[in-house]
């Protein structure tokens, strides 16, 4: 009987193997169009491979539905990983079980749906098809932006349970909406245990307003639900979209061993509770104050074994920013911090390692409703066994925006170069440490006094390993690393993250110089130029009747020291330089002249899917209607005018169409340095951001060393420099002379608006208003 | 080597056994005073038994600290279970691990601390000692009330993890505060897996205001934390404290196989999410509209396999009451209901099995702040596979206080006696069923059409068993019970719950009649009487100069038909009948006469730890300053005046000292029927409840068939009947004649205040105000 059973088993095994092999052969034929793809998906059986032929696939809407098994998933893959390019209006939706997509490259297009990759196939009248145990891997999504930045979408939207995004490279999102979102509305998507692992999140440029997260887990409306999403071993490189790189809004999420490299934002436990943030690296450049760390809101998080290096952020962007909550907070605002543990972390050369009471706004009680006042300080919170090394001593180790009286500090070691600090009942202990260099970014403080052993807090024995995965058992060691005999973890070796076939490392290239000596060659040469090239304009005057199209990174300058002159005779309200999507223009050492009705520079009115850029230096600009006109939903990270003159223009620099009062604006940095404005009649500088949004920290206006004379004659609101709602304003060392306005500027005192060393002659005044009344966004 | 190891192991085992035995002998000596007890606790080792000598222990403050082990706990027990009585100012606090307390009886006292039994020993300056794996079992806590009802305490307060309350009998709490509370502030108390099992929660009388829960799990401030408390196999008998018998305010709690018997309240998921409510019995009496079922707020609860019988509650007290939430609710108010599953429940003879949109108050938008408006309807909620049997057809199976448009109904079967109902897209199916009687309270509907199979919702395969624990596997059965061949579960067999030694079953006893014919015997006989006895007063006039003390249940009546007359000459502002704690007085067929400055009835000003009661019938009352004066923190479940006359008094029935505006009041039911009020100058009826509290549904004033003449002459607020804030008021078939007031009554239209068939002659008017402006309590 036994033998008989064995024989039957073998037979069954044989038959099933046979079936699989057969299915594989049948379905492994190359798919070369969407109709074939559709049919292949319909027919697919567990173990099948659906293979897309190499090449460009345009406008592909893939609804990948099917039912694989754990051992025999259904796989949809590129003939050669990376050689299948998905362009145009395309998306990929999963619905079913054990489905794998491998090796695709999404670029030159956008999703006409709410997501590029969706782990659900939605239906209006019947139940949605939700994905379980499905995976996108070894794929790239790049610049796949909707043409209008206010049109929100996601690039990857999770639903269901046990789905995975792994080994992908994802970069360049500019439009509204997080790059990756885990949605957990509905019982099908809670306790999801999704995996977001081994990905390379490449640069996401500053969005200029909220909704630019790289990863968002849930939202406030689902913030009570258990999620258990696992985010590990990812590289976040320059993920600058907004103040939150990761916005965790659900419960029991884990963030482990990720590298945050020069990312202008933080990992934020915005809503939801009981997250584990363990063994991550937060690496700054020692300069950029926008690069953050971990910002804590809510209950029960454990922040352990993390390493913070060279971070210069403060306040919201501190390496550890613990916020004040709103008492009895509304669901979508700020709950109090309680029951948080911050243990075994190491901070090296950070400007302000620990801030508590971040976001306290008791001073704004007059202009804000009670339900917006963050007065509830952190309670039942333990900060223990951390190490801080500061190459320059800090005035405070703990910055108390509000009292940290609900926090217990235990056995933290600090080398503050001998400078005194408040030690919180002996919970922060001064010591003299040495740095041991493991790599450029990893320096481990050593020499912790032998008599200081790790504090054994409640459940601390659950912190079993250190930053490098070494056991903490039998060790009383303080800080992120047990011992100092450790190998370089090579955290910035990009081959460890993302796909097997794509790298974002660019070889540095010498720019090519294209010399132009005839008007009609200008556009031709621009078209021929590669990104980074220079158009050198020979001495002389060039008359142009049509706009020059700029859709790449290019510099236009005079060939010689003597300035070439471009005279623009184009139609009214058209620009000499039309700044299109990806058009990053530098104009240097040149003369630009208009006909009084047309513009020097303007963005497009639409289709600005990717950012533009503008630097103007050593240039004389005159006789335009607008110097720069930036339309709604256009964004440039930086706009700079320096060493230039602007004369006899109707309007100056105009970035004021983002009037939705949802925190959006048109450029992150507007810099005017050493310029001379003369007879600019209105909108000399007009830069707008609206909406009360404490966590968008953007808009930066710098006006320095410049002279404004006879400007603002027609300015209706009687202000020379308009920068309503811009958070950072610095007006310094300028001269304002004979400008017939009431105010040169009205500064927002509660924010970072300052002025100094300005000379005002017959030009109204600079006034500070402490609290601006803004529209509530929430 | 192996043998050697074995030998060593055996030796170790022998030694440790030996030690244990030794310890047991040492510590098993009887403890007879608190000093010995203290020393025994200090010395206790794993496996020790500390045995309290039988008898009354007064003022015992037990701090039971120690460290037992799983296999060898430290046990503190009564010499004979139930024979150790803890009285006076006493408490028990646990701090440590594996500690057991067994067989104690707490009565005739109260805790001077914040709890009678506390699973924590608090310290001011050092860390608290918290209990883990500790247990109170086989014990009784009875009437252990603080003397003032506003002084809040708990009888059992859980902290820590894995603690247990089992096989206890707990009854009679009257003061503020839940009977049992699980506190989870701090990481030491989350994921606690406490067990509250096999207890008998005996009667908790109506509290007359909020904070009278029998079990409260957490609070709104910890409502984000995982608790995993397990409440199973308990009997809740007449737990009438307030509208919530169990108030669940944390996450992942489980309520299984409990019996709610004639309990005037509901199991409420007040805060927190993802509770399991499975296999419970909710048994009503077919009359009492206060007996509730399950009230749902928040996300992710599963309500399965429950049985509801003979429940007449509606609205907040419906068998299933699904509330509307407040959009973006503040932390302590009402979150929206989402992702709830109600499946496989059976409802027999309930007045309104399912109500949705309960608590909608959009109509009060004018008098309430926006943050109080419950307009967010339940979404993503599934109601499937339930059975309803109504002996009388109902107009609606689903009562929609607000639209139930976010609810999916699937395969529910209803016998509505042929009456039509809204069927929600076929999700509620009419059928003709038969009841099969299993016991007096368990009747199972049978005869479900064969073609209706259970709907297979997401994760429904996790509902593995039915109400009786039988497998649902391979069954497509609808309703709480698979099949009908089931044995009587004997859910009301009280020997299954509580201790091994205590029963609350009272034998019915014939009252003894004590005849009194002399004034001086009155108090003597009252003192001699047992609860329930009758004092029969012989015909004649009795003059009393001192108050009669009433501290038990007693009836005072004339011996014959002709009324005896009690004349009270006592001091001003003292009562003829002094109603003390536990004093429940019935006065029948008698004449009471005062001296114009003293009172007929009054409670004590303090020490009203237990409720009093008053019924007055066929009685003539005259010439008092107050007919009834009830002081603050006194409470009577019922106060009734019937077939009586009240003449020439300065004040009438006064229950208006609960002016804290926190929802408290002095009696649940004030009934005046067929009485005659003549020349009562002010406070004819004055009954007060203050504070906006939508979930306290109390205060009941019934004034019927009565006549009020020449009353209210001195009434300052010009209202004859004052009942501000009382939720249920019914004034019907009365005559009001020549009362010089502006209003006979001002009714609260939004609540259950009505009047009908009253005759008003020269007496002002009865007015209805739709919305009273009340002080917000939250």
Image (cartoon, coloured by chain):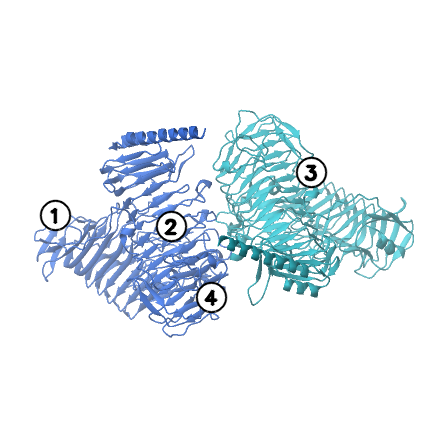
Chain colours: A blue, B cyan
Residue at 31%, 66% in the rendered image: A764
| Mark 1 to mark 2 CA distance (whole Å) | 48 Å
Asked whether residue B159 is in view, the answer is: no
Same-chain check, marks 1 and 2: yes
Is B131 in front, or is B277? B131
Q: Disc 2 marks which residue?
A: A231
Q: Disc 4 marks which residue?
A: A409
| Mark 4 to mark 2 CA distance (whole Å) | 29 Å
| Mark 3 to mark 1 CA distance (whole Å) | 92 Å
Front label number (1 vs 4):
4
Residue A669 numbered mark, or none: none
Q: Disc 3 marks which residue?
A: B285
| Mark 4 to mark 3 CA distance (whole Å) | 58 Å
Q: For mark 1, does the 10 Å Cα neighbourhood hold few (<14), some (14 to 19), or many (20 or more) residues? A: few
What is the x, y in percent for residue B109? 72, 58
| Mark 2 to mark 3 CA distance (whole Å) | 54 Å
Is B676 in front, or is A349? A349
Front label number (1 vs 2):
2
Q: For mark 3, does the 10 Å Cα neighbourhood hold few (<14), some (14 to 19), or many (20 or more) residues? A: some
Protein chain holding label 2: A
Decide: marks 1, 4 in contact (CB < 8 A)?
no
Q: Earlier in the sequence, mark 1 or mark 2?
A: 2
Give left or right: position of B101 versus B714: left
Residue A524 numbered mark, or none: 1
What is the x, y in percent for residue A367? 44, 59
What is the x, y in percent for residue B639? 75, 48
Residue at 19%, 62% in the rendered image: A644
């Amino acid at each position: 009987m036994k033998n008989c059973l064995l024989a039957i088993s073998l037979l069954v095994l044989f038959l099933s193997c046979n079936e699989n092999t057969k299915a594989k052969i049948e379905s492994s034929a190359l798919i070369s169009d969407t109709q074939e793809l559709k049919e292949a998906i319909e027919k697919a059986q567990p173990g099948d491979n659906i293979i897309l032929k190499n090449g460009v696939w345009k406008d592909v809407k893939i609804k990948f539905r099917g039912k694989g098994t754990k051992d025999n998933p259904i796989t949809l893959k590129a003939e050669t990983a990376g050689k299948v390019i998905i362009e145009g209006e395309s998306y990929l939706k999963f619905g079913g079980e054990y489905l794998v997509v491998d090796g695709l490259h999404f670029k030159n297009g956008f999703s006409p749906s709410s997501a590029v990759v969706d782990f659900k196939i939605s239906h209006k009248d019947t139940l949605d098809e939700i994905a379980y145990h499905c995976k996108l891997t070894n794929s790239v999504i790049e610049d796949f932006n909707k043409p209008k930045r206010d049109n929100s979408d996601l690039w990857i939207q999770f639903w269901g349970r046990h789905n995975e995004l792994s080994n992908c490279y994802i970069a360049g999102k500019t439009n509204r909406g997080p790059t990756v979102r885990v949605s957990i509305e509905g019982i099908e998507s809670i306790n999801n245990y999704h995996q977001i692992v081994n990905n390379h999140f490449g640069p996401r440029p500053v969005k200029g307003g909220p909704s630019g997260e790289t990863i968002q887990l849930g939202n406030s409306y689902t913030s009570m639900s258990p999620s258990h999403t696992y985010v590990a071993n990812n590289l976040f490189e320059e993920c600058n979209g907004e103040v939150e790189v990761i916005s965790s809004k659900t419960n029991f999420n884990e963030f482990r061993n990720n590298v945050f490299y020069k990312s202008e934002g933080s990992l934020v436990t915005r809503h939801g509770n009981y997250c584990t943030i363990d063994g991550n690296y937060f690496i700054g450049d020692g300069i950029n104050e926008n690069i953050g760390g971990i910002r804590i809101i809510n209950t029960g998080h454990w922040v352990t074994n993390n390493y913070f290096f060279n971070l210069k952020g403060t306040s919201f962007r501190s390496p550890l920013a613990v916020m004040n909550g709103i008492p009895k907070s509304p669901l979508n605002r700020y709950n109090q911090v309680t029951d948080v543990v911050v243990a075994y972390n190491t901070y090296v050369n950070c400007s302000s390692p620990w801030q508590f009471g971040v976001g306290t706004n008791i001073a704004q009680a007059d202009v804000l409703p009670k339900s917006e006042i963050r007065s509830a300080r952190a309670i039942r919170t333990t900060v223990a066994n951390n190490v801080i090394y500061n190459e320059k001593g800090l005035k405070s180790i703990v910055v108390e925006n509000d009292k940290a009286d609900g926090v217990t500090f235990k056995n933290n070691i600090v080398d503050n170069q001998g400078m005194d600090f408040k030690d919180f009942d002996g919970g922060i202990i001064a010591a003299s440490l040495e740095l041991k260099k493991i790599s450029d970014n990893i320096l481990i403080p050593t020499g912790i006094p032998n008599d200081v052993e790790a504090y054994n807090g409640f459940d601390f024995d659950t912190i079993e390993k250190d930053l490098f995965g070494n056991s903490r058992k039998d060790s009383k060691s303080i800080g992120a690393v047990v011992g100092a005999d450790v190998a370089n973890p090579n955290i910035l070796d990009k081959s460890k993250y993302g796909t097997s076939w794509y790298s974002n490392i660019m070889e540095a290239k010498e720019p090519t110089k294209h010399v132009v000596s005839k008007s009609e060659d200008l556009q031709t040469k621009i078209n021929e130029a590669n990104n980074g090239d220079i158009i050198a304009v020979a001495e002389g005057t060039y008359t142009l009747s049509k706009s020059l199209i700029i859709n790449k990174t290019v510099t236009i300058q005079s060939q010689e020291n003597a300035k070439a002159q471009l005279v623009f005779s184009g139609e009214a309200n058209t620009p000499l330089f039309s700044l299109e999507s990806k058009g990053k223009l530098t104009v240097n050492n040149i003369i630009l002249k208009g006909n009084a009705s047309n513009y020097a520079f303007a963005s497009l009115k639409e289709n600005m899917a990717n950012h533009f850029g503008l630097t103007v230096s050593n240039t004389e600009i005159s006789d335009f209607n607008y110097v720069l006109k930036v339309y709604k939903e256009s964004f440039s990270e930086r706009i700079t005018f320096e060493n230039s003159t602007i004369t006899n223009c109707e309007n100056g620099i105009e970035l004021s169409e983002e009037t939705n009062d949802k925190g959006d604006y048109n450029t992150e940095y507007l810099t005017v340095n050493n310029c001379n404005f003369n007879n600019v009649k209105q909108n000399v500088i007009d830069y707008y951001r609206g909406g009360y949004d404490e966590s968008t920290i953007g808009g930066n206006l710098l006006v320095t060393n410049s002279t404004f004379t006879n400007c603002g004659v027609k300015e209706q609101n009687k202000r020379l420099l308009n920068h309503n709602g811009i958070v950072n304003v610095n007006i310094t060392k300028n001269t304002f002379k004979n400008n017939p306005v009431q105010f040169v500027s009205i500064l927002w005192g509660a924010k970072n608006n300052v002025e100094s060393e300005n000379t005002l002659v017959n030009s109204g005044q600079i006034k500070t208003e402490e609290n601006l009344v803004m529209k509530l966004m929430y």
